[in-house]
Amino acid sequence: MSKLMIGLLVGHLFFSSPSQACTKNGSEGFLPKNDLNISVDAKEVSSVTESEFNDVISDIEKIYAPIVSGYGGELVVVRKWNDGTVNAYAERSGKFWKVSMFGGLARHRTITADGFALVVCHEIGHHIGGVPHYSYQWASNEGQSDYFATLKCLRRVWQSEDNISVVEKMEVPEFLVKSCKKEWRSREDRALCIRGAMAGDSVAKLFSSLSWNPKPAKFDTPDPKEVIYTNDNHPATQCRLDTYFQGALCEASFNEEIGQEEETQGVCHSSRGHTVGVRPRCWFKPTL
């Protein structure tokens, strides 16, 4: 029986830590002991309600439970609204492929309902997000789980919603609008692109608010770093926003699952002539 718990932020927040994987009984967890605990009666929190917390999870769980079943697992989403931990985990125990979501994360002032949905998708991405995986582990690595969240999961979950109306209520950077308009023809596809990227913006603001280097990430300031080998760890904030953005721009269909062994399946890839929508080189090194 293998057990692995993968946190969303630990590598970004604590650069001195050599590990991005956590065990239940090990010395490391999602975060070291700290005051990041947002109770249900805390002030200055996000607008995400308990009802929205549960609705977001239910919408994603309904769609992805049968998909996970097709991979041989049984999706179990643990809902911990009353737990103030700013946290999210993916774990496997036999056939049970588990995702644990906490109210503390949903209540963080930077998180929108869409941003919370992205986190749920990211954790499911650890289970089925495809290559690259952590070395010698079942889990898709951090960057890949980020990419899966906007490329596949959020698109699939939101495909039947009125995304145009949703986006019209947002304050969206002009660069993002122009970028989505350039890559997508229909108004609905453009709105879905914007909505996914803005969910990533919400989560990026969370990273910045908890970082020792709180410089805000922007859509028009991509991380110029190029790794010499794929980084399994949590990328820096700008790099993560770049990944959400490129996932939203990629033209690959959400109906085509990402390859579990082959890195070009179901994604945008430079070997196929794509220059937009590819996984950013700030964490990903293509092998083809």
Image: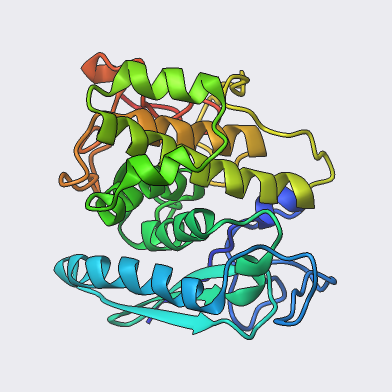
Instruction: Locate the C terminus and report the quarter of the image it occupies.
Output: top left
**Residue 46 visible somewhere in the drawing:** yes
On the question of residue 15 being in view, the answer is no
How many marks do you count on the picture?
Answer: 0
Q: Quadrant of residue 73?
A: bottom left
Quarter residue 193 falls in:
top left
- Residue 75 vs residue 2: left or right? left
Q: Residue 89 placed where, x, y %?
A: 52, 70
State the image quarter where residue 222 is shown: top right
- Judging depth in this view, the residue of 225 and 99 nearest the camera is 99
Identify which residue is drawn at 26% across, 36% down.
Answer: 188
Q: How is the image coloured?
A: rainbow
Residue 32 is left or right of residue 200, and the answer is: right
Residue in the foreground of this view, choosing between 180 and 214: 180
Task: Give the camera-side residue of 163 and 271.
Answer: 163
Going by the image, does 111 lie left or right of 213? left
Residue 8 vertical placement versus 281 (above, below): below
Give the answer, above or below, for where 105 lies relative to 198. Answer: below
Image quadrant where one finds the N terminus: bottom left
Tell me where residue 23 appears, x and y as whole percent: 58, 75
The picture places residue 24, in percent across and down from the top left corner, at 59, 81
* Residue at x-position 16% and y-position 47%: 255
Residue drawn at x 58%, y 41% as measured from the top left: 201
Kindly identify the residue that appears in the image at 27 percent across and 81 percent down. Answer: 95
Provide residue 134's location: percent of width, then percent of height: 45, 52
